[in-house]
Image (cartoon, rainbow, N blue to C red):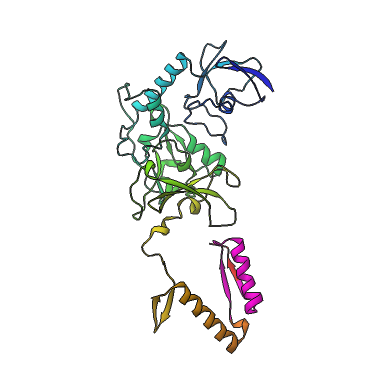
Amino acid sequence: MIKIIINGTECMVEEGITVLQACRNMGIEIPTLCYDERLRAHAACRLCIVEVEGKSNLMTSCSLEVYEGLNVQTHSEKVMRARKDLLDLLFSNHPNDCLTCDKSGDCKLQDYCYEYGVARGTYEGEKRSLKIDMTNPFYYYDPSKCILCGKCVRACQELQGTSAIELNGRGFETHVGTPFELGINKSTCVSCGNCVSVCPVGALMPKRSKYIPKTRIWDQREVRTTCSYCGVGCQINLVVKDNNIIGVKPLNVTPNNGLLCVKGKFGYKFINSPDRLKTPLIRKNGKLEEASWEQAYAYIVERTNEIKEKYGSDAIGGFASARCTNEDNYLFQKLFRAVIGTNNIDHCARL
């Protein structure tokens, strides 16, 4: 532990952590757009700058390690003015369409512009105008809204390990792109959507299904649950409006640490489909008809007993689901082995 001074207050902090981490441990919020605790410090957005005693320039707190005797000011007049200028520069090259943007209310750039009093971009001139990449079936990329924080690129490279996207071009022409600008669908992208999850603005957004209505974040609620697609047990928040699931957000906890696969991130849209079965169906005279669960259970018991009596237990087989819990599948195999009396039990673990 070492002694440092933050905003005039002496404190003991762990050696080796950054100024940003030390401030957050003390409850001091410093704005960031490019920072992610899972990624190497990049210092691209510069918003986390702080004033350090003895330094002529402002320092990025996400990349500056603490040292004995460090004296920093996180919200001095100089720092606040510089942060406002940085936000002004970003917003000057950003569409001012917050009224219609789907990210409104959940956009960090919007939040910080409000906090620092940036009502409009004052730097006039040419703005980036690049074509929206709609080639991925699950999400799209709008380069005009991209602030070039690099989080999506680094998440794809450092966390997902796919390296499907990178920062192409130089200077004013810099943008997130794919090799040879062939589009995301021609890249090595696996549609995990982790780039979408980390994007702080509206540049990377999921495509809206025809079954999902337009909504604002203040009309939504989040429900924590476990992804049911495989046995990893990824923790997710289901985004819900009017009892309909309209999105999925990964939780940065064990075991997935804020990451998901394509199924966990985007494989929820069947839930609101009008084609989804909502009651059991029993075939009568060659036609499937809706039935109650009581009728379905009675039919299953009746037919199972008939088949077992006429052909024996091994004429019956069971097929379990990878989307059920381990406990459900355990009971299912016990039903077949101990009650029905057959080992004809399989499991679709390749869903």
Q: Where is residue 21 shown, x and y percent of the image?
A: 58, 27
Q: Residue at x 46, y 14 (%)?
A: 78
Asked whether residue 329 is drawn in magenta, I would say: yes
Q: Residue at x 47, y 42 (%)?
A: 197
Span shown in magenta? 316-345
The quadrant in which residue 9 appears is top right
The quadrant in which residue 144 appears is top left
Q: Where is residue 202 shown, x and y percent of the image?
A: 39, 38
Of residue 216 and residue 123, the one placed in the foreground of this image is: 216
Indicate left or right for 320 with 207 as reference. Answer: right
Of residue 164 and residue 33, the one placed in the foreground of this image is: 33
Give the vertical position of 15 relative to 98 (above or below). Answer: above
Instruction: Give the farthest residue toward the bottom.
Output: 310
Of residue 225 and residue 206, the one placed in the foreground of this image is: 225
Quadrant (top left/top right/bottom left/bottom right) for the N terminus: top right
Give the vertical position of 131 relative to 288 (above or below). Answer: above
Asked whether residue 188 is drawn in magenta, I would say: no
Indicate left or right for 132 with 311 as reference. Answer: left
Give the vertical position of 85 relative to 183 (above or below). Answer: above
